[in-house]
Image (tube, rainbow, N blue to C red):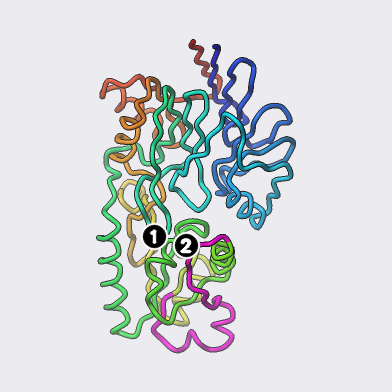
Amino acid sequence: MSKKIRMTRNGILCEINEMKTRLDPKRVEAEGVNFVSHAHSDHLPKSNGGTILSSHETSEIANIRGFNMNKFVDSMENFSLINSGHILGARGILFDDIFYTGDICTRNRGFLNGAKIPKCKTLITECTFGLSEFVFPQLSEIKKKVNEIISDLFSKGKPVILLGYQLGKAQTLSQIFGHWQPLYYHDSVKKMNDLHRKLGVSLKEEMGHSEAESLGFLDKKPWVMIAPMMRSENFFIKHMKSKYNVVTIGFSGWAKSPRFQFRGYDYSIPLSDHCDFNELSNMVIESGAEKVYTVHGFVEEFASHLVKMGIDAQPLRQDSLDDFL
């Protein structure tokens, strides 16, 4: 059996006995299998052209984000979709002893269950947080800290905006901090939360910020709002601060490192939808892979770390080619 794995301008290409499988391609090809791991914009194709293998949830979310999967299937013989724990509908894919993680998280977070890692001979893994400084606190610690911050601010009559990526983090925040009342959603988060409810996720149905403001509800402080990640100089944040004196709490794995200053928010909390450094390392060991390719993130650093652990690992770069029997 001949296997070739390489990075191309159109995503990762796996060729097995002339069968082509493209992993998160930017352009869907008519020939072979096109796998889309999840509906974040950096993983969605830019155009149709062939059959797309993905989860039903990813197809639904992609549709409201402006990309309709014309030829979509959620199962295919000899391919197993594996929950990757990243966002709703996110999947890795296992085929011919190759496991591609897509974006992956092994921690449980609200309605999201952490990924269970399958055994494989070849692992293609993301390493967004593949540096040893990125070790995240337990979710219980984060909840305790943030609830204490909100409680203190509420006692002073100050409203709070919790900021996380519109797809993924915002829904996690909506669930784990949904006990605070009154609770409002930024309009874009409300739209995404409504779709999550349609897809079976238990999230409170709350008012969008435009309606709440037009009805004067935001004048009755304090309150909590879930909003998408945005810069502190964004008009929405500046307006909320000047009119309602809100306190902002931003949630991102990048908040863990002073080298990637997560500026502009009153508080920064290291909550991520990706594996941290230790979880990535454990995931590789659990897979039992004989060969590991690193993609997306600190590819050189994490591959070097794995080599020091005695694991055959290398970054998967464009035009690099690996042939093996």
Query: Vertically, is 317 above or below 35?
Result: above
The answer to whether residue 201 shows anywhere in this view is yes
Query: Vertically, is 250 above or below 117?
Result: below
Magenta segment, which residues?
A: 199-224
Give the residue type that dot 1 points to: Gly
In the image, what residue occupies the spot 61% across and 30% down?
22
Q: Residue 252's spot in the image, x, y percent?
A: 39, 54
Q: Residue 239's spot in the image, x, y percent?
A: 51, 76
Horizontal arrangement in the rendering, residue 54 relative to residue 90 (left or right): right
In the image, what residue occupies the spot 53% across and 21% down?
5
The residue most toward the front is 77
Q: Which residue is mark 1?
A: 110
- Assign a secondary structure to mark 1: loop
Q: Which residue is mark 2?
A: 171
Q: Residue 300's spot in the image, x, y percent?
A: 38, 28
Query: Vertically, is 251 above or below 260?
Result: below
Front residue of this view, candidates 280 and 32: 32
As for residue 277 lying within the magenta part, the answer is no
Horizontal arrangement in the rendering, residue 293 relative to residue 192 (left or right): left
Within 10 angstroms of label 1, few (less than 14), some, or many (20 or more) residues?
some
Which badge, 2 or 1, comes first in the chain's sequence?
A: 1
Label 2–label 1 contact, CB within 8 A: yes
- Assign a secondary structure to mark 2: helix
Q: Quadrant of residue 122?
A: top left
2 vs 1, front mark: 1
